[in-house]
Image (cartoon, rainbow, N blue to C red):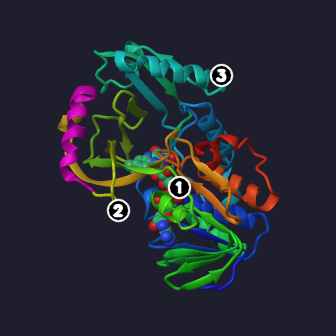
Amino acid sequence: MRTTADVVVIGGGIQGLSCLYHLAAKGIKNISLVELDMLGSGSSGRSAAMLMLSMKREETIALSFVAWKEYMAFAGLFGESTHFKPIGHLSVATRAAEHELREEIAVQQKMNVPIEILYPEDIKELVPAVNTQDLVLGALCRTDGVIEPHAVMQAYARGAKELGAEINERVQATGIVLEKGRVVGVETTAGTISTPLVVNATGARAKEVGAWVGLNLPISNYLRHIFITDEFPAIPQNTPFVMDAEVEWYFRKEGENVLMGMGREESTTYEPQFVPEFQEQVIERAALRAPILLNAKILRGWAGLRALTPDDLPILGYAPGVEGFVNCCGWGGHGVMHAPTGGILTAEIVADGKATSMDVTPFRYERFL
Ligand SMILES: Cc1cc2nc3c(=O)[nH]c(=O)nc-3n(C[C@H](O)[C@H](O)[C@H](O)COP(=O)(O)OP(=O)(O)OC[C@H]3O[C@@H](n4cnc5c(N)ncnc54)[C@H](O)[C@@H]3O)c2cc1C
């Protein structure tokens, strides 16, 4: 492992790897990434892997548009496919969730997201499996879809290495060395790396790493479970990702199988605790929203953490009071789709002195002070 670097990226998830690649692409040669386990072993390897333009807010839609450009050009840029499948994203709302969904649709229309309003009979026609009896509205974005996050991470890792960056798996950052309020090094389980600049891309542990330099990053981690059924042809391949807006329960095809996700309980540990019994709640919602899924057998599942800020926007860029410490964290439930954006903006902030691809004001740490 190098003992000196121009930049150290802590965290080998999809955001840290994107930062690594985009910093290297800006011409910074000597960058070192440390990952305490294996690349993608955090939330990035546990997601539902959706890319969406149909996000809820102007800020997150803007993040999606920047990401979209790179994701759609990915194979040309990296020689590696994202395996993107535009399956579409359908949000359905009961009376309780209608107001919120209508507000989201208005924002999406304003931001030129290709969104279609559906009524219960349209929803039934599109996805016969959905029980529409208590639904009042749906919003469909046909261009949204699913990718393969591991392929993206491998492409970023390979691209960064070709540009001279170094990746160290099973090396944990344990502290940051400060001198007169500025970063001078990162302590790790494999020794200290002298560096003037560190990127905090540690996902669920970002609050802990921020605390090393005196920051109080308002990030809380929320558990989400995913379950995979056995082969289930009764839900056909052309089914979109269906989100029940009221309870954030969702399903989509995963190969021949069906993937279901749900959960927003706060986690007290950094290791997501898989609770097999949670499937009872998932099945309960399935019974209401897509009862045909009661015939499916659940084969396996996992849990992951969503590192959420109070306003569900990420924390990006330098923090006041400590020189050389850059955050790229707090990505909540959208860090995979926004991975290119996190890396692009971080690289612009570090290498060019400011972000130019979009306005990063809403993502500054200072908004919490
Ligand atoms: C069930 C579930 C479904 C989701 N679905 C979607 C989706 O459909 N679309 C979407 O865009 N997003 C989704 N998300 C959110 C997405 O997974 C995250 O926002 C994204 O993975 C965050 O990436 P990251 O690189 O910031 O964090 P991570 O992938 O968690 O990476 C952080 C890395 O830092 C490492 N690390 C931490 N501390 C240290 C240290 N001290 N030293 C060294 N390494 C350290 C960790 O080991 C980890 O590998 C979902 C999340 C979950 C849990």
Amino acid marked by disc 1: Asn
Could you say where residue 224 lies in the image, as x and y percent from the top left?
35, 47
Chain-order first, disc 2 or disc 1: 1
Chain-order first, disc 3 or disc 2: 3
Magenta part of the chain: 274-291
Could you say where residue 262 lies in the image, as x and y percent from the top left?
32, 41
Image quadrant of residue 99? Answer: top left
Query: Under 8 Å from ligand 1: the CB of mark 1?
Result: no
Q: Give the mark toward the camera: 1 or 3.
A: 1
Could you say where residue 150 lies in the image, as x and y percent from the top left?
50, 60
Q: Quadrant of the C terminus?
A: top right
Chain-order first, disc 1 or disc 3: 3
Question: How far apart, in angstroms, are the residues tagged by discs 2 and 1?
Answer: 21 Å
Amino acid marked by disc 3: Lys
Circle 1 residue: 216
Q: Residue at x 49, y 33 (%)?
A: 88
- Proximity of marks 2 and 1: CB atoms separated by less than 8 Å: no
Q: Mark 2 falls on what kind of element? A: loop
Query: Under 8 Å from ligand 1: the CB of mark 2?
Result: no
Question: Quick check: 102 left or right of 222?
Answer: right
Question: How far apart, in angstroms, are the residues tagged by discs 1 and 3?
Answer: 35 Å
Residue 5's place in the image compared with 22, above or below, is below
Could you say where residue 203 lies in the image, as x and y percent from the top left?
49, 58
Circle 2 residue: 271
